[in-house]
């Protein structure tokens, strides 16, 4: 149902019409539009991001219903932007920018903070309790630590974890008991901040999982790809500015080897020819000596 139809059935508050108009203009004027969930995101975090990226990124909170109306209006000028509608579940934050959406995702990832786990949270990564002193005094807590699989010992009046132990795998639900223990150990495994659910860029839709990039792994993969491409180009004798020095050196060595084997008298290979002749004469002399010739 469009806002116009809705207006015909009942009076729409003026602020709602203004909000839809503002959102529509934002959708139309920015090259990239992203949606982030507001789950576990604190207002102070958004305010800090607004200050930090005020010249590059605009943040906008609104009702999902009004966002849907604005998306329908903007879809007249922006192809496929209406596909963002299916991501409008729960509380959301709209993000408008002209930055590359992958760069935007990396910026938000770097600005996340760690929070204690709550019962029902999903482990974002394997949660490891490290070996060492817990700082806790012996008591009933020992059995609680044992229940979640932590090996312990008592030393110097404190409870120690005897080895690094994984207490939850990535994707597992964190129980109330585990959340309580992690909190007492001072472990904060939940990363809080903006995570992009989706990003629209000039008619392209980038789902959130595509935008999550491990920079270190990507960099290592690129280096390995460059090494493999370089080796392939050298072995295939494919001339490029990077491979030409190696290919020319290889060609010179092969040409010299050919001239030596073919006994071609050129000044570049004469030392090698003389050395080869000397070694052959020496070997022949040794053979003749073995047969009694002097």
Image (spheres, grey):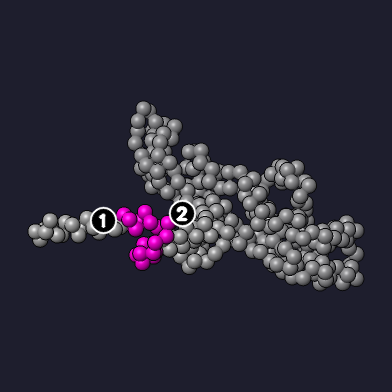
- Within 10 angstroms of label 2, few (less than 14), some, or many (20 or more) residues? some
Left or right, 278 with respect to 211, comes to left
Which residue is disc 1 drawn over? Answer: 279
Left or right, 128 with respect to 87, comes to left
Q: At 68% from the left edge and 57% from the top edge, which residue is drawn? A: 101
Left or right, 91 with respect to 227, comes to right
Q: Is residue 153 above or below residue 258?
A: above
- Disc 1 and disc 2 in contact, CB within 8 angstroms: no
The residue lying toward the viewer, choosing from 265 and 100, is: 265
Residue 148 coordinates in the image, percent (x, y): 41, 47
Left or right, 29 with respect to 288, comes to right
Q: Find residue 16 and report its image quarter.
A: bottom right
Which residue is disc 2 drawn over? Answer: 169
Residue 47 seen in the current view: no
Q: Is residue 250 above or below residue 216?
A: below
Residue 161 coordinates in the image, percent (x, y): 38, 39
- Within 10 angstroms of label 1, few (less than 14), some, or many (20 or more) residues? few
Circle 2 SS class: loop
Question: Can you say which quadrant of the picture contains the C terminus?
Answer: bottom left
Q: Find residue 284 and report its image quarter.
A: bottom left
Circle on res. 243: none
Q: Cα distance, mark 1 to mark 2?
A: 68 Å
The residue lying toward the viewer, choosing from 33 and 260, is: 260
Residue at the far front in the pictured view: 294
The residue lying toward the viewer, choosing from 258 and 58, is: 258
Magenta-colored span: 258-275
Circle 1 SS class: helix
């Amino acid at each position: 149902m469009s806002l116009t139809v809705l207006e015909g059935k009942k009076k729409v508050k003026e602020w709602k019409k203004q909000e839809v108009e503002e959102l529509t203009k934002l959708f139309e004027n920015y090259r990239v539009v992203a949606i982030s969930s507001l789950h576990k995101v604190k207002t102070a975090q958004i305010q800090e991001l607004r200050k930090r990226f005020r010249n590059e990124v605009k943040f906008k909170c609104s009702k999902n219903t009004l966002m849907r109306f604005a998306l329908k209006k903007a879809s007249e000028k922006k192809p496929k932007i209406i596909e963002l509608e299916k991501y409008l579940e729960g509380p959301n934050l709209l993000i408008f920018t002209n930055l590359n959406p992958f760069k935007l995702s990396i910026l938000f990832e770097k600005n996340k903070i760690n929070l204690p786990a709550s019962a029902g949270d999903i482990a974002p990564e394997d949660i490891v309790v490290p070996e060492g002193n817990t700082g806790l005094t012996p008591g009933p807590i020992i059995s609680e630590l044992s229940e979640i699989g932590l090996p312990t010992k008592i030393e110097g009046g404190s409870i120690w974890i005897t080895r690094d132990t994984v207490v939850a795998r990535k994707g597992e639900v964190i129980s109330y008991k585990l959340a309580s223990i992690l909190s007492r150990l001072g472990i904060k495994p939940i990363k809080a901040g903006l995570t992009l659910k989706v990003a629209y860029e000039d008619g392209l839709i980038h789902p959130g999982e595509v935008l999550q990039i491990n920079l270190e792994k990507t960099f290592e993969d690129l280096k390995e790809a460059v090494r493999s491409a370089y080796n392939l180009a050298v072995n295939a004798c494919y001339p490029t500015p990077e491979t030409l020095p190696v290919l020319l050196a290889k060609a010179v060595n092969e040409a010299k080897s050919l001239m030596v084997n073919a006994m071609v008298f050129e000044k570049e290979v004469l030392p090698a020819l003389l050395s080869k002749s000397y070694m052959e004469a020496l070997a022949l002399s040794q053979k003749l000596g073995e047969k009694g010739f002097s």
